[in-house]
Structures are given as structure tokens and as C-alpha cells.
Amino acid sequence: MKILHILLLLFATSLSVLVKAADSEVATQEITLNVASTALLAISGPPVVLQMNGAAEAGDAVSEAVEDQNTRLRITSLVTGSETRSISAKISESPIGTRLLVSLLEPNESFVNRTEMGVLKGEQELGINDVTLIDQIGTCWSGKQDGDGYVIKYKYEAIEGATVLRGGSITITYTIFEASPE
């Protein structure tokens, strides 16, 4: 019986050593870290009304252009790796005898990661096909207060030599998309 007790004691002691051997002073755990890509746009500001006026007196010239830069294009862009984004715009239908030009201007000081805000393309004529307004956008965001975001500058002008100028209501669609690698 003593021998059985000694064998059981040795077995229990060796078992506790084996169990303890699985634990150590250092433990590791593998963790997967993901970054969810984000691309969001929003327009802020008052409604835009661009109106070319007729002459005040006979013989005066008809106004040829009118501008507005009271609205802002807000952005949140989180990119992963080396990808970049672009922003394009298009209009629902082309105006008759006139054209609508748009440009994005630099945002205010609230813009975060200004070095990643992209390359502004300057004034572009809008049509029914997308036209790129800015490219090479990285991780950045504009803020949500009044005046935050890219300044949207609209210029509505008569086409030289047009005999009929017709206004109307149009919709402008802005799109943020992943840029194709060059």
C-alpha cells in the first residue's frame, strides 16, 4: 500500500509539473487588426441660385456670367495602404446656350491631414459625364461646422455666340471613388 501511495504521489507531482509547464512567465496571443476603408461626401450650405440678368437699360450688355461660392463639400476619407481617391461631378442635363463651371477650392483650417487633401484640378465644365475635380486624396476629413469642407465655386456663363439662353433646374452629382493606379 505504501508503494501505491508513493507511486500516486509521484504521479500527482509529475502531473502538476506537466500542467505548470504549459504556463510560463510570458504569454502570447495573435490578434487580427483591420482598418475599414471609408469614403463619404456631403454638401452643406444654402441652396444655389445662379441667375444671369438682362440689361437695366436699352443698349446695355446682358450679364454674361454669375458666380457662387457659398456651399461646401464635406469629406471623410480613410484609405488603407497606398490607395488614393478622387472626386468627380456631373450634371443631370446640359443647359442650352450656357454652361456651368465648377471648381473645388482649398478648405479652411479645420481640415485634418491637409497634406492628404488631394490635388485640386481647377475650373472644370460640367456635363452629363463625370469630370474629375480633385485626385490623390488620402486619409483626411473636413469637419462638420459651418464653413468646413472644400469650397465649391460655381460659375454660370453664356456661351459666346449663343442666340438662345435657357435656364432650368439641374442636379449635380458628386462622387468619391478609389482612383485607378497609374
Image: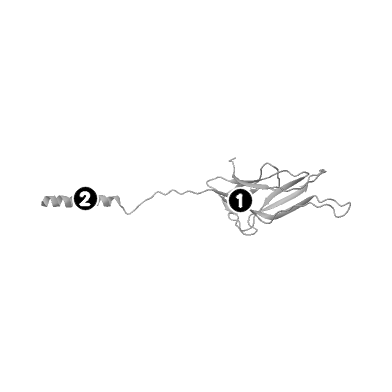
Q: Residue furthest right?
A: 58
In the image, residue 60 lies at what x, y percent?
87, 52
Report which quarter residue 113 is drawn in. bottom right
Precedes in sequence: disc 2 or disc 1: 2
Query: Mark 1: which amino acid?
Result: Leu
For the point 29% across and 50% down, the residue is 22
Disc marking residue 152? none
In the rendered image, which residue does mark 1 sit on?
41
The amino acid type of the residue labelled 2 equals Ser
**Does residue 16 appear to the left or right of 69 in the view shown?**
left
Q: Nearer the viewer, residue 162 or 102?
A: 162
Residue 109 % position (x, y): 62, 58
**Which is more toward the observer, 56 or 39?**
56
Taking the spot 17% from the left edge, 51% from the top edge, the residue there is: 8
The crowding category of the residue bearing disc 1, from other C-alpha atoms within 10 Å (few below 14, some 14 to 19, many at least 20), is some
Colour mode of the rendering: one colour
Residue at 24% from the left image edge and 51% from the top image edge: 17
The residue under label 2 is 14
**Residue 2 in view, yes or no:** yes
Q: Is residue 71 left or right of residue 37?
A: right
Indicate the position of residue 39 as horizontal and vertical percent values: 57, 49
In space, the residues marked 2 and 1 are separated at their CA atoms by 65 Å
